[in-house]
Amino acid sequence: MRIALGADHGGVHLKDRLAAVLLAAGHDVEDVGTHDTSSCDYPDFAHAVADRVLDGRADRGVLVCGTGQGMAMTVNARPGIRAAVVADTFSAQMASLHNDARVLCLGERVVGQGLAQACLEAWLGASFEGGRHQRRIDKMTAPSDP
Ligand code: RB5
């Protein structure tokens, strides 16, 4: 899989670790930065990853900041793409199966490397089920009365 990876200063260590894991598993990884712990702005990296997933340069994206929250909020402000913040493997798997989340967001200050890697593998190992879940995703941007 082609995977775009990004982080801010709060997530760079975990991002680098996950890049190594993905490369070892045979994925094609593009690391959009950041590359050190100098203070930077997470939306810059969230947009770089979202751009790549939206235009097809990447199949999926992974973003790491302190909590994962700012990254996910930024990606979810972009039409046509969904990001999920996860800190457990069940949610990571379901984010693929039911929510078709093409971007996974993790918090380096929230999860350890082992759990982050397990979440990544659970998310990558699952595929969107479509059907009723696609109908629900369509309603995210087309509100209707229940
Ligand atoms: C940076 O201090 C921190 O705010 C950022 O990494 C992230 O947690 C934001 O959502």
Image (cartoon, helix red, strand yellow):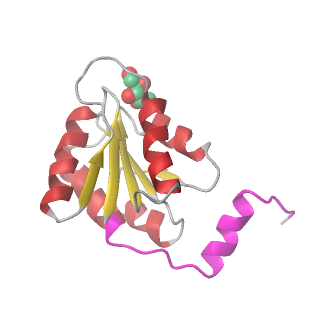
Question: Residue 55's spot in the image, x, y percent?
Answer: 51, 55
Please give the count of numbered marks on the rendered protein: 0
Question: Residue 41's spot in the image, x, y percent?
Answer: 43, 24
Please tell me whether residue 109 is drawn above or below residue 26 in the rendered image: above
Nearer to me, 76 or 23: 23
Ligand 1 image-quadrant field: top left
Q: Residue at x 51, y 79 (%)?
A: 129
Q: Magenta segment: does it hold 128? A: yes
Looking at the rendering, in which quadrant would you find the N terminus?
A: bottom left
Q: Residue at x 17, y 57 (%)?
A: 23
Q: Is residue 58 left or right of residue 109?
A: right
Please tell me whether residue 61 is drawn above or below residue 145 in the rendered image: above
Q: Which residues are magenta?
A: 124-145
| Residue extending furthest toward the bottom | 131
Q: Magenta segment: does it hold 36? A: no
Question: Residue 96's spot in the image, x, y percent?
Answer: 45, 67
Q: Residue at x 65, y 51 (%)?
A: 79
Please tell me whether residue 76 is drawn above or below residue 138 in the rendered image: above
Question: Residue 102's spot in the image, x, y percent?
Answer: 46, 59
Looking at the rendering, in which quadrant would you find the C terminus?
A: bottom right
- Res 78 → quadrant: top right
Nearer to me, 18 or 68: 18
Q: Is residue 61 left or right of residue 22?
A: right
| Residue extending furthest toward the left | 24
| Residue extending furthest toward the top | 39
